Amino acid sequence: MIKSIDELFDLVKNRPTMKIAVASAEDTDILQIVEKAKQMGLADFILIGAKEKIMALATENNLELDVEIIDQADPAHAAALAVELVNSGEASAVMKGFLQTCTFLKAILNKEKGLNVTGLISQVSVYDKDNGMGLQFLTDCAINISPTLSQKRQLIDNVVDLAIKLGYEKPRVAILSALELIRDDMPDTIEAAALSKMAERGQIKNCYIDGPLALDNAVSPEAAAHKNIMGEVAGRADILIAPSIQVGNVLTKALTFFAKKKVVAAVVGASKPIVMTSRTDMFENKLLSVALAGYIASVSN
């Protein structure tokens, strides 16, 4: 079981280098990540974009790229080509560069030429627990706005699969809400209870689920004990399922900007790893997201 972000980082550096196809790579931030990740042995890259602009940006910023560059200025075609390279085995993961998220995801979700997405794709934020006892996973923070009951089940399947790849044999999943009681005027609490019962009956496998749980009851044994909430998950959650993108997005940004945590982003649910970071993410967190994609690719292979 990988117990920290730093441990993940070290593991990737000691594995065979994976190749990542970057769609629309003509962006200084992206090129800086590419240079640093390559120097550290985290990944190799194929850059797809306007070649002249990529080379000009590299020169302006004194970047030594030493990577293959495919000249394709159109963002939609660049995204499609990045996915094609992954499907053909020339690359192991795909990464979003300087293009609209919808354009990037359209190539991934293409039924004929995409990354074999049969359900939802979702975003997961991964960070160290405060007690030093492992990683915590938070979803969905960037893609699914107001997931339905069945969509939350798919979010759980996606994040549990990721957690298992990182060594969490049967992760503990907390379905978050504002409180731990079921109320008919708060539909998310009813859905949380349903998901908990679905896990109990074997409809959702490979994890423990409890909900609804307020955040404190999910992550603090003391808070859970104070309210007499017991079970496998209470106070010990490995995975947090946010009721909406608003909750997930605000919480992950609070972890980054207030708590100054290392937060790694992963997009899951496709046949291959996807790197899709925010432009406001800290440089180190973007680099760590590349490392996570490399690790997932290596264990999947």
Image (cartoon, rainbow, N blue to C red):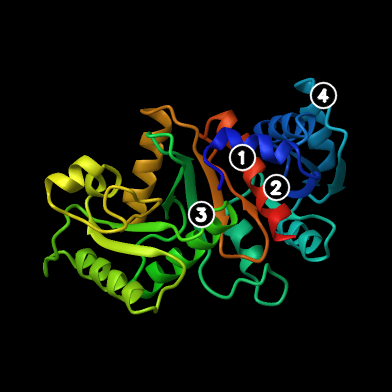
Q: CA distance from mark 4 to mark 3?
A: 44 Å
Residue 55: image location, x then y, percent? 83, 32
Residue that numbered label 2 is attached to:
294
157 or 74, nearer to the observer = 157
Point out the tag, 2 or 1, that comes first from the N-terminus: 1
Residue 50 horizontal side relative to residue 189, left or right: right
- Residue drawn at the location 39% of the way across and 78% of the way down: 202
Q: Please name the amino acid that badge 4 sits on.
A: Thr
Q: Can residue 258 be seen? A: yes
- Going from the N terminus, do you reach mark 4 or mark 3 first? 4
The amino acid on which the numbered mark 2 sits, given as a three-letter code, is: Gly
Residue at which label 3 appears: 168
Q: What residue is drawn where x is 75% and y is 38%?
A: 14
> Residue 135 in the image: x percent, y percent?
47, 43
Mark 4 crowdedness (10 Å alpha carbons): few <14, some 14-19, many ≥20: few
* x and y, in percent, of residue 68 in the image: 88, 43
What is the C-alpha distance between the residues marked 4 and 1? 32 Å
Q: Residue drawn at (59%, 56%), measured in percent from left and top? A: 165
Which disc, if any, is residue 129? none
| Quarter of the figure that contains the C terminus | bottom right
Mark 1 element type? helix
Identify the disc placed on residue 59.
4
Contact flag, marks 4 and 3 (Cβ < 8 Å): no
Residue 264 location, x and y as percent? 53, 41
